[in-house]
Image (cartoon, rainbow, N blue to C red):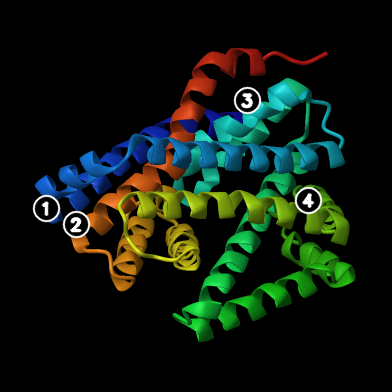
Amino acid sequence: MMEQSGKQLLPKLLTGLVFGVLVVAVFLFFADLQEVFDTIRRMPGEALLLAFVLTFISYLFRFWKWHAFSRWSNFAISWKDNMAIFFIGLMMSITPGKAGELLKAYYLEKRARVPYAASIPVIFYDRLTDVLAMMALVGIGMLVYPLGFTSFIVLIILIVLFFIVLQRRTMLFRLIDWFTRPKKLRRFRDSIRYFYEHTLQLLQVGKLSFAFLISFVAWLLECISLYVILLAFQFDISLVASILTFSLGTIAGALSMIPGGLGAAEGSIIGLLVYFGVPGSAAVTISLLIRFVTLWFGVIIGIFVFLFRRNALMRRGV
């Protein structure tokens, strides 16, 4: 079943690529094209290079976290193979809700015989700690710019309640047993129990603190990438405003469930940049630039890794 899903993910990747091109075309259509290109030409090359370097370091931090999860879960896989799997996961960032990252579970099973019931909780937990880090960054921004602060507090309360409920082992086991009571679902009971138990192990305070800290630093670096680009264009916008703009835009894209958050993330970033005083065409340009630096850069690296490493990952390890 997962093998069929793995084969079906490539058409979804192509759909995401086409959708991405359309989103860029739409934003350019409504902006002043000449002004957009003039703005890009004015940007110093070293600033753009620094933004790419910061983003790549962010990827390395996120890989460190991913490999730590793999070690905690006793996955018998080398860091080189695991790095290839991690970057292939970045390639699938433009699938709806990043569901294409389940391709990592497929390659873990092929290369290291890791059961899907063991790898999928790790993928889920990896995404969860990213969300928590982004929420923390949004919180920092809202301390200075209280945009939608009430909604943010409500969301924080819901997240806390989620973690409280997740710790109620007896209640969750009863809920799993009730959910899998129908005969067609009963065969999934043990896998769901295993998924929950493995997730619970990863939610230990020490592991959660480490994962949160690494995620926080990684996503902060991408926020700084936006700040570097803004400075290059000589816009007087603070680092805190840049953090709020990028993190809130990224969360908006994730909540939209659109492939890669395309359109939703760009639109949110543009709106916030305009709010902080960036002219419309410049806001469109900067939004498209930061999305290329932080999203499409990872997708392109992932495609190259996929093309050169997929056959090796399909061979069983010793």
Position in image of residue 125 (x %, y %): 71, 52
- Dot 4 or dot 1: first in sequence order is 1
Marks 3 and 4: in contact by CB < 8 Å?
no
Marks 2 and 1: in contact by CB < 8 Å?
yes
* Mark 4 to mark 2 CA distance (whole Å): 47 Å
- Dot 2 or dot 3: first in sequence order is 3
Q: Which mark is residue 32?
A: 1
For label 2, count other residues whose C-alpha is less than 10 Å away and answer few (under 14), some (14-19) or many (20+): many
For label 4, count other residues whose C-alpha is less than 10 Å away and answer few (under 14), some (14-19) or many (20+): some
- Dot 1 or dot 2: first in sequence order is 1
Mark 2 highlights which residue? Answer: 281
Mark 3 highlights which residue? Answer: 84
Query: In the rendered view, would you say 267 is above or below 93?
Result: below
* Mark 4 to mark 1 CA distance (whole Å): 50 Å
Q: Amino acid at mark 1?
A: Asp
Determine which quarter of the picture holds residue 72: top right
Q: Amino acid at mark 4?
A: Phe
Q: Amino acid at mark 3?
A: Ala
Q: Which mark is residue 195?
A: 4
